[in-house]
């Protein structure tokens, strides 16, 4: 009996990490992908990669909540829709019960007392900076999950952040108000008297909180990361995070009712519970983003979160990227989309980004397209040799001094390695490679037959 759990664990691990078989039933393959995604998300949570970001966002949220609501409140007040803000805030702190209503009331008092018009230029600038810092930290957390090191340009970030802060609440309030007006119209009331329309509306109304939060999360997962997120993967993350959100509301409400925090923390109980709920909320949102990332890069999931850098991995990745780009350019013209390339390769985005940077620094590839999201050859294909691609990975920045050794034996081996690469690939152009010319095969066959003597190579 004692061997059975270990045997089941071994079988599960073998099934989880074996190569995907295209001949398996779609349901089995989908279950395999979901299991790998679940493993990767749980691993990141246990290792602290997601929890640390959630903790930092709790602190930033407490500093930015009043300024953010002040900006949104001032815009909504100008449109006469500021009264719709309070129900939305109460829904966010619903798990805290009557204490949540008290927090919302106090926050709105602070917001109402904050007169944006009399702050002055310096005060208004600090107010906007505090609000933007929250959105910027959220974007950095999402970029970290998506392994994106490049951030948006300053102008684009500023416009995107202001649209989220100012336009976002207006759209949400407008959607809620329009829905309430439509449901309250006489025509809709008469239609709801007809069955099964009434039953369908009742069912849809009960599911509406789930659907609203799922679609909101899906939009966030597409909009915030500085990369292209496919809708189906963002939707999967939104559905899972939305369901977890509603489940957490129910569970946290039970926790607040049954716990005796006031006896322990007295007057600080409300603040402690608020901190815990904000942490849980951010943790769910970031876990959903992680689900979307691993869903889009499911074939790249490994036992460890980040694969250690490897020279052969970089060379193989560079050759595959260059071959895909050169073949596309030679056969159909145009470039290859960077985001699609990252999804198709068997390595993570951090490896792809590192290799592409080296290839562009060495003028092997270049970015093209209106959004600079296409990769094209930087030169004519017949002018780029395979040796140039390998040199781009081995020494991307040739402006820096070449690494040398004081030992003659080390220098000899290094020179022989360079000579071997030069002999094998200097006369093989990308054009010959992608077109499969016989000269390439004969050249590589000579290399496979055996290296030249050391004396002739060194010469």
Image: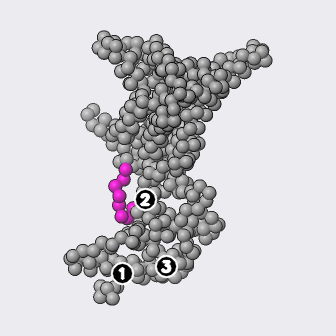
Q: Which residues are magenta?
A: 306-313
Question: Is residue 310 found inside the magenta-colored segment of the image?
Answer: yes
Left or right of residue 344: residue 13: left
Compared to residue 380, the image places residue 80 above or below, namely above
Sequence order check: which comes first, mark 3 or mark 1? 1
Instruction: Name the image quarter holding the C terminus.
Output: bottom left
Numbered mark located on residue 243 in the image:
none
* Residue depicted at x 60% and y 68%: 329
Residue 398 point in image, percent of width and height: 39, 72
Left or right of residue 452: residue 433: right
Counting other residues with Cα less than 10 Å from the Cα at mark 3, is it few (<14), some (14-19), or many (20 or more)?
many
Residue designated by label 3 = 428
Q: Secondary structure at mark 2?
A: helix
Q: Secondary structure at mark 1?
A: helix
* Residue depicted at x 59% and y 38%: 163
- Alpha-carbon span between mark 1 and mark 2: 26 Å
Q: Which of the two discs, 1 and 2, sits closer to the camera?
A: 2
Q: Which of the two discs, 3 and 2, sits closer to the camera?
A: 2
Counting other residues with Cα less than 10 Å from the Cα at mark 1, is it few (<14), some (14-19), or many (20 or more)?
some
- The secondary structure that most of the magenta stretch takes on is loop
Instruction: Name the image quarter holding the N terminus.
Output: top left
Left or right of residue 133: residue 230: right
Compared to residue 216, the image places residue 386 above or below, namely below
Residue designated by label 2 = 354
Task: State the image quarter where residue 270 is shown.
Answer: top left
Residue 159 visible (yes or no): yes
């Amino acid at each position: 009996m004692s061997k059975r759990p270990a045997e089941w664990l071994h079988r599960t691990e073998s099934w989880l990490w074996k190569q995907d078989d295209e001949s398996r039933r779609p349901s089995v393959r989908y279950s395999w992908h979901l299991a790998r995604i679940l493993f990767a998300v749980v691993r990141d949570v246990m290792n602290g990669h997601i929890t640390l970001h959630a903790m930092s966002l709790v602190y930033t949220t407490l500093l930015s909540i009043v300024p953010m609501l002040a900006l949104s409140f001032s815009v909504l007040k100008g449109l006469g829709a500021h009264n719709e803000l309070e129900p939305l805030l109460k829904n966010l702190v619903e798990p805290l019960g009557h204490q949540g209503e008290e927090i919302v009331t106090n926050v709105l008092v602070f917001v109402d007392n904050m007169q944006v018009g009399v702050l002055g230029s310096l005060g208004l600038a600090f107010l906007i900076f505090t609000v933007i810092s929250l959105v910027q930290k959220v974007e950095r957390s999402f970029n970290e999950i998506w392994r994106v090191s490049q951030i948006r340009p300053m102008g684009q970030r500023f416009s995107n952040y202001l649209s989220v802060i100012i336009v976002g609440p207006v759209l949400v309030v407008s959607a809620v108000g329009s829905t309430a007006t439509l449901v309250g119209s006489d025509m809709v009331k008469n239609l709801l008297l007809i069955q099964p329309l009434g039953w369908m509306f009742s069912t849809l109304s009960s599911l509406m909180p789930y659907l609203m939060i799922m679609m909101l999360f899906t939009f966030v997962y597409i909009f915030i990361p500085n990369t292209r997120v496919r809708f189906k993967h963002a939707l999967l993350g939104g559905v899972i995070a939305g369901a977890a959100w509603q489940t957490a509301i129910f569970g946290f409400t039970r926790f607040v009712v049954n716990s005796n925090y006031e006896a322990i923390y007295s007057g600080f109980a409300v603040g402690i519970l608020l901190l815990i709920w904000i942490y849980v909320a951010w943790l769910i949102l970031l876990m959903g983003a992680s689900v979307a990332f691993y869903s889009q890069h499911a074939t790249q999931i490994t036992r460890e979160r980040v694969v250690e850098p490897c020279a052969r991995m970089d060379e193989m990745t560079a050759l595959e990227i260059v071959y895909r780009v050169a073949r596309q350019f030679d056969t159909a013209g145009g470039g290859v989309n960077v985001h699609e390339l990252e999804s198709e390769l068997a390595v993570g985005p951090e490896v792809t980004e590192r290799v592409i940077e080296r290839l562009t620094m060495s003028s092997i590839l270049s970015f093209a397209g209106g959004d600079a999201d296409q990769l094209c050859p930087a030169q004519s294909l017949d002018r780029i040799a395979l040796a140039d691609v390998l040199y781009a990975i081995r020494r991307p920045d040739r402006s820096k001094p070449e690494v040398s050794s004081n030992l003659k034996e080390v220098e000899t081996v290094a020179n022989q390695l360079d000579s071997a690469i030069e002999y094998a690939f200097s006369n093989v152009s990308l054009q010959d490679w992608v077109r499969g010319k016989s000269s390439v095969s004969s050249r590589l066959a000579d290399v496979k037959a055996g290296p030249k003597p050391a004396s002739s190579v060194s010469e």
